[in-house]
Amino acid sequence: MRIVSGIQPTGNLHLGNYLGAIRNWVRMQEDGECLFFLADLHAISMPHVPADLSANTREMVAALVACGVDPDRSILFNQAQVPAHAELQWLLNGTARMGWLNRMTQFKDKSGKNREGASIALFTYPVLQAADVLLYQATHVPVGEDQKQHLELARDIAQKFNNDFASEDAPVFTLPDPIIPRDAARIMSLRDGSAKMSKSDPSDMSRINLTDDAETIVQKVKKAKTDPEPLPSEAKGLEGRPEAANLVGIYAAMAGMDVDMVLADFGGEGFGKFKPALGEMLVEMLAPINARFVELRQDRAALDAILRKGAEKARALAAPTLEATYAALGLVRG
């Protein structure tokens, strides 16, 4: 197995990132060869502040390592240090089709009502996503529900390129399969149980940041939106109670339990008892991550060294695929 996945360096990781993706990245290091990248080339598809992008890239490296991504076991790098990502995107633009990209729902979501004012990069970034995984002959890509469409596009591009420019017994690209982790938790906002926990929410009270100290975590949990009813004794009793379901789901995900097991302990209790228990557990389990992150983020030289080391390995892995793509297209290289 060769697993490839990326994350945009848009600020601090929060609990939703950790339970939805990063914790599974850490576990995947046991399953095969892993490449994890900071998607800084993707980040410039939207308006951004250059100084913030570079700072956030280093901060994200610190957070990932603090969470357990090991640069000695995995390849951890940022796209900008591996030019082959951008090169392969351009080469694949000849294979990708406008109709395919027009169907991408995330472009419609991110461009909003101003589609004509959106950047070309925002429209074509699914082709860069395809290049991100095809470049390394990835066999598996972890995806959430919102990314399945983009992986299907990557497979379509790879299949069409192989059909058009390669022989059946010697394809240029591997078609990657999705990994949808069974225990990837979908964590919702602490202020609105129907909205996903997000960095872009203007209220910091809506999320638990991995950089939050113990007091902040306890306060955020204490003030999290709930309802007046006690907790039910089984999961079906949480239907129609999004905020209650979210808090119980967070407890279950952090403790490695299922929801019914949590409710067996807390069913019939009010949030006056449940919230302190949840806050205490979050503080205990996130404290080592927070401490390691605070230590790492101060050492810019060490963070840059991690990225350089990972990028060097990634460039070596990418080179054969890029050369094969140029050759298949009939492009003359010196």
Image: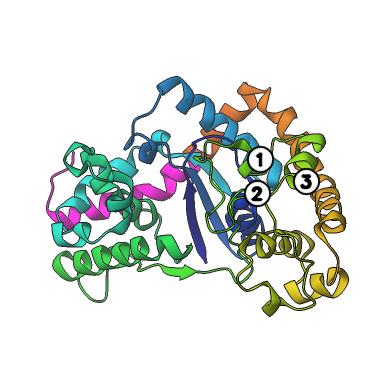
Which residue type does callout 2 highlight?
A: Leu
| Secondary-structure class at tag 1 | loop
Which residue type does callout 3 highlight?
A: Lys
- Real-space CA distance between mark 2 and mark 1, rounded to the nearest whole angstrom: 6 Å
Would residue 141 be counted in the magenta stretch? no
Residue matched to label 1:
209
Asked if labels 1 and 2 touch by Cβ distance under 8 angstroms, the answer is yes
Vertical comparison of 13 with 271: above or below: above
Camera-side mark, 3 or 1 = 3
Residue matched to label 3:
222
Query: Which of pointers 2 and 3 lies earlier in the amino acid sequence?
Result: 2
| Secondary-structure class at tag 3 | helix
Taking depth in this image into account, of 136 and 221 the one nearest to the observer is: 221
Decide if residue 306 is in sight here.
Answer: no
- Real-space CA distance between mark 3 and mark 1, rounded to the nearest whole angstrom: 15 Å
Residue 205 falls in image quadrant: top right
Q: Main secondary structure of the magenta part?
A: helix
- The magenta stretch spans which residues? 312-334
Vertical comparison of 266 with 194: above or below: below
| Secondary-structure class at tag 2 | helix
Which residue type does callout 1 highlight?
A: Asn
Residue matched to label 2:
15
Query: Which of pointers 3 and 1 lies earlier in the amino acid sequence?
Result: 1
- In this rendering, the count of numbered labels is 3
Identify which residue is drawn at 81% across, 37% down: 214
Taking depth in this image into account, of 332 and 287 the one nearest to the observer is: 287
Tell me the tag on residue 87: none
Asked if labels 1 and 3 touch by Cβ distance under 8 angstroms, the answer is no
